[in-house]
Image (spheres, rainbow, N blue to C red):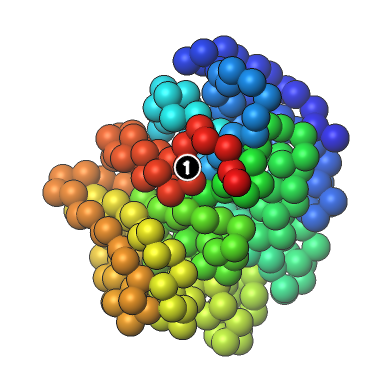
Amino acid sequence: MLELISEHSCFGGVQRFYKHDSATIGLPMRFSVFIPESKDDAPLPALFYLAGLTCTEETFPIKAGAQRVAAELGLILISPDTSPRGAGVPGETDAWDFGAGAGFYIDATEAPWSKHYRMESYLHELRGLVTQELPVDAARLGIFGHSMGGHGALTLALKRPDVFRSVSAFAPIAAPTRCPWGKKAFGGYLGADQAAWRKHDASELMAAASTPFPQGILIDQGLGDKFLAEQLYPEAFEEACKQAAQPLQLRRHAGYDHGYYFISSFIEDHLRFHAANLGGLRRSA
Ligand SMILES: N[C@@H](CCC(=O)N[C@@H](CS)C(=O)NCC(=O)O)C(=O)O
């Protein structure tokens, strides 16, 4: 059951914020959804947007400026929170890059995190919920995200290309098993066994795949991003795409940093990319 927290008219459609009791997480969760105006009740293609470290379900609708073009293209935009809230794990709010606000879109296997920190399964619970309760076409789903959420988008799509038919990312953590953010999160949530980590590393998953997205993957990366050298490794994902014969458009932009001024500068391209892949306003066959 969805509880509507607020609704705001926006570019002819509605920006909504919902709360619901998640069976997967075992706690209340929040998400945002933009629903464009629609002439009939036909289900619309939908994009899941996964935000980065420290963000919530509000960050994307407030800062990315995606609604105007989504309204034009007839795309629903869904953005979940980035972790459980109030799980009561000791120390969960002590660091900004682990615990609350940093769920990494994986299911923790290490106690005490494993009880509530199950964001990968949660995304699929949310997918079921929105396709049931909102005018979302389950056959036309895409996924994109930023930084930690870029890692989430790439890995969730690579694990389930049958579900997510289109994927893109902004400044993704593209090889988490190699970078400090990823090592900290995977060590904490998954334990010391690095074989378990590799199952959630976009570059590892891509290297083992064979052209899962023939229509291509779009990644934008700012070259003024202070996290680029130490944390993001887009070149590892680029190399993996070559190995997997996966078409990739990796666009490197001089001067842009890691924040939402960068994202809002290129959001329109991502929305048009997904709409083209998912068939825009047309009904699925
Ligand atoms: N708190 C961190 C930065 C965290 C950060 O940059 N988070 C990114 C995602 S990884 C973000 O989107 N922040 C929210 C925002 O820019 O509005 C720092 O002090 O360097």
Task: Give coordinates of residue 216: x percent, y percent.
Answer: 36, 60
Q: Residue at 47% of width from left, 24% of height from top?
A: 71
Q: Is residue 80 left or right of residue 117?
A: left
Task: Give coordinates of residue 46: x percent, y percent.
Answer: 56, 40
Q: Residue at 57% of width from left, 12% of height from top?
A: 9
Q: Amino acid at mark 1?
A: Gly
Task: Give coordinates of residue 31: x percent, y percent.
Answer: 65, 36
Residue 140 visible in the snapshot: yes
Q: Residue at 64% of width from left, 75% of height from top?
A: 190
Q: What residue did someone put label 1 on?
A: 279
Residue in the foreground of this view, choosing between 265 and 45: 45
Q: Is residue 33 left or right of residue 238?
A: right
- Can you say whether 146 is above or below 261 in the image? below
Q: Residue at 52% of width from left, 67% of height from top?
A: 158
Q: Residues within 10 Å of mark 1 (few under 14, many from 20)?
A: some
Task: Give coordinates of residue 3: x percent, y percent.
Answer: 80, 28
Residue 179 visible in the snapshot: no
Q: Residue 17 appears in which quarter of the rendering?
A: top right
The residue most toward the front is 285
Residue in the foreground of this view, choosing between 209 and 110: 209
